[in-house]
């Protein structure tokens, strides 16, 4: 049975992933970790762990005899543009520390999420292929491309089973998003259920890939359980579930909340990031190699989000 460490476990993905992993592998087989000393959201084994602290990282891996790591600790795109050097440190040095500790201390497999942020304006933005030009313009994107390459390097050079997904914007109701460009697609629901208008920082026609969290959790577990000989790419799979603009999301919410209104005050930093990201990704490699098949489309996701937030 796997013994799993999750870094950055108190973030938007982590709080739900630890629960999903514990249902699959057992409560005591999943160690949550994050920067905070208190961990009331961890509901099980927890370690305070800064991924920049290599000594503590090694201790945690050895003490719990970790065999698999889900490395979620990172700074997201918008925060990363405000703190680029910190984003480099956490996303790059943190990931390198995790790979190094893993290969030296008996860890067999490591999951590191990438992002639509690993693409840039020179990438084909419609049906973005699995293998294509990656010249991102954000510090976040630079760290994501380098993280993808590091995964390939550690797999090829040291035989560490490094896998990962290029996630689109993730939509969930439990933990708030951590400061990304796609956060509007979560925030908007909180305003809709409170009966308040929402001011969106992206233009109404900005199309981005998105996914509802249960599909993302399923993808994290399914990819890591896929037989290695089925995977041609292994690392950095495009995965998507839906594409929409703020205008289209608003129209879908209005089917349930007819009085809901939106207005727009465009933030030039986040708008330029969104403009450099795909309008829609081609995720056929994930579908073919390990059976990726999302359950939630726009209308199903909106109905579920509103139901849970109410
Ligand atoms: P988040 O910002 O919600 O959570 C990140 C967590 O990392 C936070 O709890 C934070 O305290 C922790 N952290 C920050 N610095 C740390 C450090 N030095 N040591 C240990 N922990 C640290 O992020 P998330 O949305 O849960 O994203 C997790 C991963 O998934 C990231 O790699 C992110 O790039 C990727 N991803 C997320 C999305 C999304 O829409 N949420 C989309 C694509 C990719
Ligand atoms: C962000 O907007 O930074 C994240 C992502 C898509 O990587 N949600």
Image: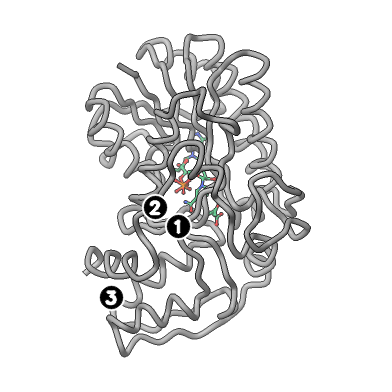
Residue 302 falls in which quadrant of the image? bottom left
Q: Residue at x 35, y 78 (%)?
A: 253
Q: Earlier in the sequence, mark 3 or mark 1?
A: 3
What is the number of the mark on residue 294? Answer: 2
Circle 1 packing at 10 Å, graded few (<14), some (14-19), many (20+), is many
* In the foreground, 29 or 90: 29
Q: How many marks?
A: 3
Q: Residue at x 42, y 10 (%)?
A: 62
Q: Nearer the viewer, mark 3 or mark 2?
A: 2
* In the depicted structure, whether residue 26 falls above or below residue 239: above
**Colour mapping:** one colour
Instruction: Find disc 1 in the rendering and name its residue.
Output: 241
Instruction: Find disc 3 in the rendering and name its residue.
Output: 193
Q: Element under label 1?
A: loop
Label 3, label 2: how far apart the Cα atoms are: 26 Å
Q: Earlier in the sequence, mark 2 or mark 1?
A: 1
Contact, CB < 8 Å: mark 2 with mark 1? yes
């Amino acid at each position: 049975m796997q013994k799993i460490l999750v870094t950055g476990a108190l973030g938007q993905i982590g709080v739900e992933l630890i629960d999903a992993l514990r249902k699959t592998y057992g409560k005591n087989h999943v160690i949550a970790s994050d920067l905070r000393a208190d961990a009331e959201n961890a509901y099980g084994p927890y370690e305070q762990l800064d991924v920049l602290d290599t000594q503590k990282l090694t201790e945690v891996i050895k003490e719990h005899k970790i065999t698999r790591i889900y490395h979620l600790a990172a700074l997201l795109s918008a925060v990363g543009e405000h703190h680029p050097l910190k984003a480099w440190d956490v996303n790059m040095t943190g990931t390198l520390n995790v790979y190094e500790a893993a290969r030296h201390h008996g860890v067999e497999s490591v999951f590191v999420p990438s992002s639509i942020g690993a693409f840039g304006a020179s990438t084909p933005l419609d049906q973005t292929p699995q293998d294509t030009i990656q010249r991102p313009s954000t510090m976040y994107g630079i760290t994501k491309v380098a993280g993808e390459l590091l995964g390939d390097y550690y797999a090829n050079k040291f035989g560490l089973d490094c896998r990962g997904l290029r996630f689109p914007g993730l939509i969930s109701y439990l933990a708030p998003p951590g400061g990304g460009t796609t956060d509007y697609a979560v925030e908007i629901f909180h305003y809709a259920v409170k009966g308040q208008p929402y001011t969106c920082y992206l233009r109404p026609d900005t199309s981005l890939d998105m996914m509802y969290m249960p599909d993302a959790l399923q993808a994290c577990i399914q990819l890591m359980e896929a037989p290695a000989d089925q995977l041609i790419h292994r690392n950095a799979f495009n995965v998507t579930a839906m594409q929409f603009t703020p205008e289209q999301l608003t129209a879908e919410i209005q089917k349930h909340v007819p009085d809901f209104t939106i207005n727009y005050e465009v933030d030039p930093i986040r708008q330029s990031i969104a403009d450099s990201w795909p309008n829609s990704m081609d995720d056929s490699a994930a579908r073919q190699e390990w059976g990726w098949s999302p359950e939630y489309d726009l209308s199903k996701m909106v109905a579920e989000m509103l139901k849970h937030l109410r």
